[in-house]
Amino acid sequence: MKTIIKLFTILFAMQMVHSQQLVQNIDDINKLKENEAIFINKPLKDLLKEIKPEIRGVFAHSDPYFFNFKFITREQRIKKEGNRVSLFVYVQDMIDWKWENRPKGKETVWTKEDAEKYGNMIVTGISIVYPRN
């Protein structure tokens, strides 16, 4: 009996290690909205772990409280290149985002420090916005 329990424990652990991220590419971004219930009342870092494409830009807003994540650079947005989809993640608390304290020329770049600072914020909603062509 102990052997069977150990076997199931090992198999379960291996499955968890090899599980894929929900969003493998930008075309999968709608899966976040489809599975929104999984992320509601959970830390932002849990949602961010499910996104494989690099977040290249972010805008933070304080009324209501949300992050607007972009997957292309500012230059690409200006030239209207790449997939310009926006991921809006609403959070429970006010976002302490001071534009004047951000590095000059990189105010909208999402960093590892941002992920650490804001990762424990509680998600209250998700929206996906596709640009008009």
Image (cartoon, grey):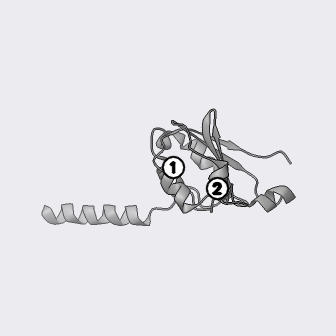
Secondary structure under the numbered disc 2 in the rendered image: loop
Density class for disc 2 (Cα within 10 Å; few <14, some 14-19, many ≥20) is: few
> Would residue 50 be visible to someone looking at this image?
no
Disc on res. 14: none
Give the quarter of the image for residue 132: top right
Identify which residue, 24 or 49, lies in the foreground.
49
> Mark 2, mark 1: which one is toward the viewer?
2
Decide which of 98, 48 is in the foreground and name it. 98
Residue plotted at (64% across, 60% down): 25
Nearest the camera: 123 or 133? 123
How far across and down, in percent of the image, does residue 110 sit? 62, 58
For the point 53% across and 44% down, which residue is it?
Answer: 35
Mark carried by residue 118: 1
Q: Rounded to the nearest whole Å, what is the CA distance between mark 2 and mark 1?
A: 15 Å
Label 1, residues with CA under 10 Å away: few <14, some 14-19, many ≥20: some
- Where disc 1 sits, the SS reads helix
Residue 8, by quadrant, is bottom left
Give the quarter of the figure containing the N terminus.
bottom left
- Residue 130 in percent (x, y) is at 75, 46
Where residue 37 appears, as percent x and y from the top left, is: 50, 39
- Depth order, front residue of 90/3: 90
Identified by mark 2, the residue type is Arg
What residue is rendered at 56% in x and 44% in y? 96
Callout 1 amino acid: Tyr
- Judge whether residue 79 can be spotted in this image: yes
Residue located farthest toward the front when viewing the structure as drawn: 100
Residue identifier under label 2: 102
- Kindly identify the residue that appears in the image at 62 percent across and 62 percent down: 53
Q: Residue furthest left?
A: 1
Q: Earlier in the sequence, mark 2 or mark 1?
A: 2
Q: Is residue 11 left or right of residue 124?
A: left
Total numbered labels: 2
